Amino acid sequence: MKKLLQISLVIGLMLVLSTVIALAADLPAKDVKILEEAGIPLFKGAEFINGGLGDELVGARFASSAPVEDVRAFYQDKFTKWALNAEYGAWILYDGEPGGGPAAYMGKQQISVVTNKNLPEWFGIAKNKTTEIIIVVPPK
């Protein structure tokens, strides 16, 4: 009886974890469409974690195992005319004029790429996925 209970608990836990992991990997179709319309590509292999685009949601969080520098270079190559805010540990590439602090990029399309060692623990993803990508597309 005790062994059956242990097996049942393990199977139940595996089902819960597999559901969480499956949900984390799927970017909703409406969000894919919004990113396509905005012309913002996803970094190859980036995993959707949470958030969303459209309606009241304006930002989606992704995780990657690629080095932060590689992800940043990818987006800088794609958006050569966007400005960069790299102050106080932030790295925010945005569609706007340089300077002006947060007021310059608030309400603009933006991509933030930083190291976040908490992602695996917070979202139950692979331990090597510590590069956090946040993409913001404000509603039109």
Image (tube, helix red, strand yellow):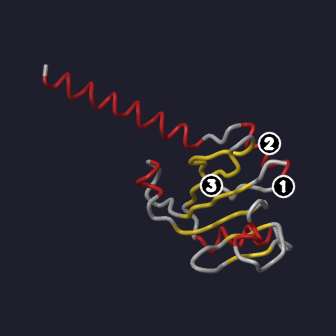
Q: Position of residue 30 (x, y in %)?
A: 75, 38
Please tell me the numbered disc located at residue 91. none
Q: Quadrant of the N terminus?
A: top left
Q: What element carries label 2?
A: helix
Q: In the depicted view, which residue is nearer to us: 17 or 118?
A: 118
Q: Which of marks 3 and 1 is nearer the N terminus?
A: 1
Residue shown at the point (65%, 71%) measured from the top left: 70
Residue shown at the point (61%, 47%) measured from the top left: 51
Q: Which amino acid does label 3 sit on?
A: Ala
Please tell me the numbered disc located at residue 39. 1
Q: Nearer the viewer, mark 3 or mark 1?
A: 1
Q: What residue type is labelled 1?
A: Gly
Q: Name the residue under label 2.
A: 33
Q: Name the residue under label 3.
A: 46
Residue farthest left in this picture: 2
Q: Which of marks 2 and 3 is in front?
A: 2
Q: Where is residue 99 in the image (x, y as percent from the top left)?
A: 77, 80
Quadrant of residue 94 within the rendered picture:
bottom right
